[in-house]
């Protein structure tokens, strides 16, 4: 039930953009996005609900394609603080739990 | 905002002993809490769903007799690793559904790094 993320890793220079994709084989109720720094717990970024939402705050936004069971996280004009591992979390319709994706390690360099 | 407190942050124990990890929701009630395990450079793997006042639901492959979960109140869930072995060494993280009344998603505790020697 683990969703698959791509790419596995990406290196950006400050100011560049990145897209992280999350794909599930199950019908989804919602998709959550988290960022985790080394040795710390994941930090919630945003949640997208069934219905084809798009959301964003500051320079991080996301979309949810309900028909394809896919979500994408968009990071624009990346900053050094964006470095970390990004996980999508998926809630399957009818289930009250969250399964995390395979993760994408993002490194932003000066 | 929603806050989940997890203790201890780290623990070192001898092989064969038991370790208890606590997870508390500080400013909201959590009828359901979740326990994850994360090995280095890997994703978070859901171990079990903890339901207040009832038995936990374990994911396939997780030994329920080894990882005892108790959710006695709406704000506290505990995970006890019994007869710990070195292969149980990992980062254990709890979370709770904090979406009622806000856009918080699932809130995570700070995690517990368990080392079994």
Image (cartoon, coloured by chain):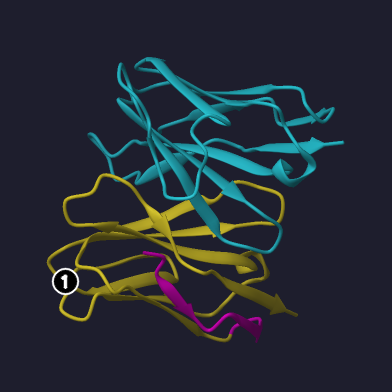
Chain colours: A yellow, B cyan
Image quarter hosting the N terminus of chain B: top left
Q: Given the current orientation, which residue lies at the most extreme top position? A: B73
Compare residues A50 and A62 and report the one nearer the observer.
A50
Q: Position of residue B48 (x, y in %)?
A: 43, 39
Question: In the rendered view, would you say A53 is above or below B100?
Answer: below
| Part of the protein shown in magenta | A1-15
Q: Position of residue A83 (x, y in %)?
A: 65, 68
* A76 in magenta: no
* Left or right of A66 on screen, residue B46: right
> Which chain contains the residue that carries disc 1?
A
Q: Given the current orientation, which residue lies at the most extreme left position? A: A51
The residue lying at 64 percent from left, 64 percent from top is: A81
* Left or right of A68 on screen, residue B108: right
Image quarter hosting the C terminus of chain B: top right
**Does residue B25 appear in the picture of this structure?**
no
* A13 in magenta: yes
Compare residues B69 and B62 and report the one nearer the observer.
B62
Q: How many marks?
A: 1
Q: Position of residue B82 (x, y in %)?
A: 65, 26
* Left or right of A91 on screen, residue A18: right
The residue lying at 76 percent from left, 37 percent from top is: B85
Dot 1: what SS? Answer: loop
The residue lying at 37 percent from left, 71 percent from top is: A61
| Picture quadrant of residue B14 | top right
Q: Residues within 10 Å of mark 1 (few under 14, many from 20)?
A: some
Q: Which residue is mark 1?
A: A52
Compare residues B113 and B4 and report the one nearer the observer.
B113
Question: In the rendered view, would you say B4 is above or below A52?
Answer: above
């Amino acid at each position: 039930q683990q969703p698959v993320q791509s790419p596995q890793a990406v290196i950006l220079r400050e100011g560049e953009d990145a897209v992280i994709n999350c794909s599930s084989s199950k019908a989804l109720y919602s998709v959550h996005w988290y960022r985790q720094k080394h040795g710390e717990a994941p930090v919630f970024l945003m949640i997208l609900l069934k219905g084809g939402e798009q959301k964003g705050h500051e320079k991080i936004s996301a979309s949810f394609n309900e028909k394809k069971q896919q979500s994408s996280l968009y990071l624009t004009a990346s900053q050094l603080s964006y470095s970390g591992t990004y996980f999508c979390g998926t809630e399957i319709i009818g289930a009250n739990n969250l399964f995390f994706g395979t993760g994408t390690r993002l490194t932003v360099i000066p | 905002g929603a806050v989940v407190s997890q203790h201890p942050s780290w623990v070192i124990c001898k092989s064969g002993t038991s370790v208890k990890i606590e997870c508390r929701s500080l400013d909201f009630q959590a009828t359901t809490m979740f326990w994850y395990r994360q090995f280095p450079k890997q994703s978070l793997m859901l171990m079990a769903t903890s339901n207040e006042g009832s038995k936990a639901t374990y994911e396939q492959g997780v030994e329920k007799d080894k990882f005892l979960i108790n959710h006695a109140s709406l704000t506290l869930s505990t995970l006890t690793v019994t007869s710990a072995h070195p292969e149980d060494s990992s980062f254990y993280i709890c979370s709770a559904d904090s979406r009622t009344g806000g856009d918080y998603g699932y809130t995570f505790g700070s995690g517990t790094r368990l080392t079994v020697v």
